Amino acid sequence: RKTTVYFLDTRTFRSRHCIPSLAAVKFVPLGSVISCVTRLLSAGLKLPFCSWRKRKYGMLGEEQWEWFENTMMNDHVDSSLHIVVSSVQVLTTNPVVESWGHFDMERSRLIKLLSGVNNRVVLLSGDVHFAEISRALRQGIHVEGTIPTYDIVEVTSSGMTHSCESPFYGFLCKPILFAFSDHRQKHKLNGSEEGNEAFFTNRNFGVIDIDWGANQNAEDASVTINVHDVNGNVVLSTGSLPLIWDKAWREISALEIESIPKVMSGFLLPYFVRVVEVISICLFFLVVIILLRKPNPGRKVKKKVR
């Protein structure tokens, strides 16, 4: 059996964000926090120049893309499991963090590539100082009913020494994660009946368990990825994921890729429009009041003489 692991360099060739990050500028206090805010605004307002930049710039660089595409196409025939490692998240809808989502076309290109390979694909990522499980899933209709036909799972484990709740602004971590959850799978753990949000904000690490099945039967092969806390307890789990699936029912179109929840969603635009409307109305009435109170130049002002 063969498992192929791809380590992507998402730093060397990555273009600047729509609004360049200040996190690396040493003389700017709280540069990382300011960068989180600028990423939130650029994605939330779906700024026009961000749309222009995303067409021109990217994450991997063309040389690395060529290597990755050729390698994956050569290996996908005889590999039962493909593990793609990215330092930053791929499927997240959270605009605060660095991710592939800030480069829409690069993200779509990656998802299209991963959907064209045989057998199971798993994404591993980190960087964000919390753990979560994300999923891109398309439903198709088969004669036997509704079946999952396109399924890429991403497991984020970060970090072993830091937590997003550690800094003074850590109280914002969970509210932000709850606010941006469209990418996240619900999960059942320790016998719970209802699915919970699949994230964990304390220190953690991940473990990959590959089961090749009884007598290495391909039909029984599966992979399970668990996230553990510092005491070794399982806090998140993908559950058992089969390595074999039917390629004919997994093909994904450009329209379906577009339907996968995005970072650059423009979720702030309705609020922005409301604020502009309120400001415009206030300015209108202010101008009216000024005009009404303006003295009439033809009117003579009588002065009292003592």
Image (cartoon, rainbow, N blue to C red):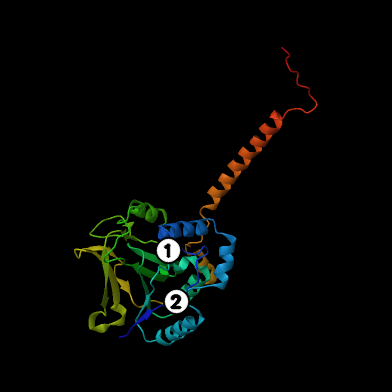
Of 189 and 15, nearer the camera is 15
- Quadrant of the image containing the N terminus: bottom left
Residue 54 lies in what quarter of the image? bottom right
Residue 233: give x, y in percent of width and height. 20, 63
Residue corresponding to mark 1:
23
Residue 235: give x, y in percent of width and height. 25, 62
- Amino acid carrying label 2: it is Thr
| Residue at screen point 27% across, 59% down | 202
Toward the left, the furthest residue is: 231
For disc 2, the neighbor class at 10 Å (few under 14, some 14 to 19, many from 20) is few
Toward the top, the furthest residue is: 306
Toward the right, the furthest residue is: 298
Residue 212: give x, y in percent of width and height. 26, 80
Of 120 and 303, nearer the camera is 303
Residue corresponding to mark 2:
12
Residue 265 sits above or below residue 254 on the image? above
Q: Earlier in the sequence, mark 1 or mark 2?
A: 2
Of 261 and 214, nearer the camera is 261
